[in-house]
Image (spheres, rainbow, N blue to C red):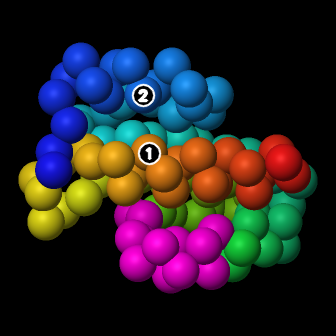
């Protein structure tokens, strides 16, 4: 179920690296080099597949930009926040 703007704003308080842009959760991360960025994408891909929730993302050299939205619901759902939290755990090593 699509979250309300208020619910989204409340959930965002629990995230460190994410913002709300164009009705999507968005983060942009810089790594030391292309290999580190691509390695992170690979780690995230396994989690996304396990959750059956796949990000929209782009990679240019050492930068990885990730956008989350639940297309079937027409906006942001709790699934997006669960994946965002998992991605934060992966990138911080927690």
Image position of 45 (left or right of 66): right
Image position of 56 (left or right of 32): left
- The residue located at (37%, 55%) in the rendering is 79
Q: Check whether the beta carbons of the residues at disc 2 and disc 1 lie within 8 A of each other.
A: yes
Q: Earlier in the sequence, mark 2 or mark 1?
A: 2
- The residue located at (84%, 48%) in the rendering is 94
- The residue located at (78%, 74%) in the rendering is 39
Residue 54 counted in the magenta span: yes
Q: Which mark is residue 11?
A: 2
Residue bearing the label numbered 1: 81
Residue 2 counted in the magenta span: no
Label 1 sits on a secondary structure element that is: helix
Q: Nearer the viewer, residue 25 or 13?
A: 13
Instruction: Give percent across and percent down for residue 21.
Output: 32, 33
Camera sees residue 38:
no
Quarter where residue 72 is shown? bottom left
Magenta-colored span: 44-56
Q: Nearer the viewer, residue 64 or 12?
A: 12
């Amino acid at each position: 179920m699509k979250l309300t703007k208020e619910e989204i704003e409340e959930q965002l308080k629990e995230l460190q690296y994410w913002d709300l842009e164009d009705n999507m959760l968005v983060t942009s991360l810089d790594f030391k080099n292309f290999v580190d960025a691509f390695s992170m994408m690979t780690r995230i891909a396994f989690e996304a597949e396990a959750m059956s929730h796949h990000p929209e993302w782009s990679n240019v050299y050492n930068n990885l930009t990730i956008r989350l939205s639940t297309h079937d619901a027409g906006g942001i759902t709790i699934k997006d926040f669960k994946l965002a939290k998992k991605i934060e755990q992966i990138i911080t090593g927690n």
